[in-house]
Image (cartoon, grey):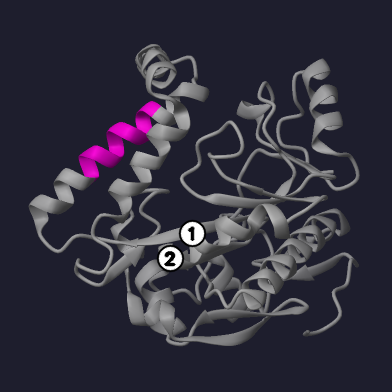
Amino acid sequence: MGKKFSLKEEKICDYLVTSDMKKIWQVELDLLKKFIDVCQKYNLKYFAVGGTVLGAIRHQGFIPWDDDIDVGMFREDYEKLLEVAEKEFTEPYFFQTPYNDSLFRGHAQLRNSMTSAIFPAEIKFNHNQGIFIDIFPFDEYPKKKYQYNIQRIKCMIYSKILGNYYFTNDSLKSRMFHLISVPIVKIVGFKKLYKHYEKICQKYNGKGNNLYTNLSFKYNRINRATPKETMENTILHNFENLQICIPKDYDKYLKAVYGDYHKYVIGTSSHGKIDFNVDIPYKEYLKELRKVGGKNGKKI
C-alpha cells in the first residue's frame, strides 16, 4: 500500500479537486484493489493503460481532472478472469460484460452496485450503473493491410449492430441503424452476436504483427497499438494509496499515445456529462433522475 488516501479538498496542478471528487476516486480505488487482489489470487497479468499510466507517472495517482481508471489484460488472462468473476466479485461488486448485462461496451467494467455513475443517454436503461473501472481485453492487429481492412470492416458492422440495438439518438442515421439492428439481434441473439464479434477481434492473436490494443473497444485506435513486450514487462508504481502494474517502458508508451505527455490541458480527461452519487445505489438514483429528467452531469 502507498500513502494514506485523503478526502480533503486540495489544489493539484492549479486544479481544485473537491472532496466530492475524492469520494468518487475512493470508490474507484476500492474497485481497483479488489480487481488486483483477484488477479494476484489467480496469477493473472494486468497493466494500467491510457490516462491511468499518465496519472501514475505525472501525478502519482489520478489526473486531477480525471474520473476513471483503465486497465488492460491480454485476451487469455481476460478470459480466465471472466471464468472466475461471478464467484469472486460479489455484492457490492459486479463484474459487468455484455454477457451478463444488457449493454454493448466491447470490454468489461467492475462496478460498485451501491453507488451511481449514470450517463444521461443511459437513464432509460436498467443495466448496472454503479461507479466503475474499465477492464479492456487486448488483441493483436493483423500483419497484412488487406487483413486489417477486412477485420476493421467486420468489427465496424458488428459494433454498429450491437451498439445501435440499445442506444439511439435523434439523428436519422442512428434511427436507421436501430431499425436494422433490432430484427438482426432478435433473430440471432445479442450474446451470440457479441461472441462472434469477440472472435473476429481475436483472430490474429499470436500470428499478427505483435502490436496489441483494445480492438473490441475501438478498432481504429492505431496510435494506441503497443508491442506485446511493452505491456508484458511491467513494474509496480504508486497510484494514490495503491501500487499498480504499469509498463516498464512507460516513457515510450506515453510518448506513443500522448506525444509530450508532460504538457497538459486542464479538464480534458473526464467522461464528460455523468451523474455520480457515492451514497445512493444506482437503482434508487435512476428513479430520481427519471422523475426530473436527469441532472446534466452533476457530480454528487
Amino acid identity at mark 1: Glu
Relative to 201, residue 52 above or below: below
* Residue 109 is covered by the magenta coloring: no
Q: Is residue 70 something that shows in the picture? A: yes
| Residues marked 2 and 1 touching at CB (< 8 Å) | yes
Residue at point 79% right, 27% down? Answer: 286
* Residue 157 is covered by the magenta coloring: yes
Callout 2: 10 Å neighbours few (<14), some, many (20+)?
Answer: some
Q: Which image quadrant for residue 180? A: top left
Residue at point 38% right, 81% down? Answer: 230
> Which segment is the magenta one?
152-161
Labelled disc at residue 138: none
Residue at point 33% right, 55% down? Answer: 221
Callout 1: 10 Å neighbours few (<14), some, many (20+)?
Answer: few
Our reading of the magenta stretch's main secondary structure is helix
Disc 1, SS: helix
Whether residue 82 sits left or right of residue 259 in the image: it is: right
Disc 2, SS: helix
Q: Which image quadrant for residue 272? A: top right
The CA distance from mark 2 to mark 1 is 5 Å
What residue sits right under mark 2 in the picture?
76
Amino acid identity at mark 2: Glu
What residue sits right under mark 1 in the picture?
79
How far across and down, in percent of the image, does residue 177 sit? Answer: 36, 18
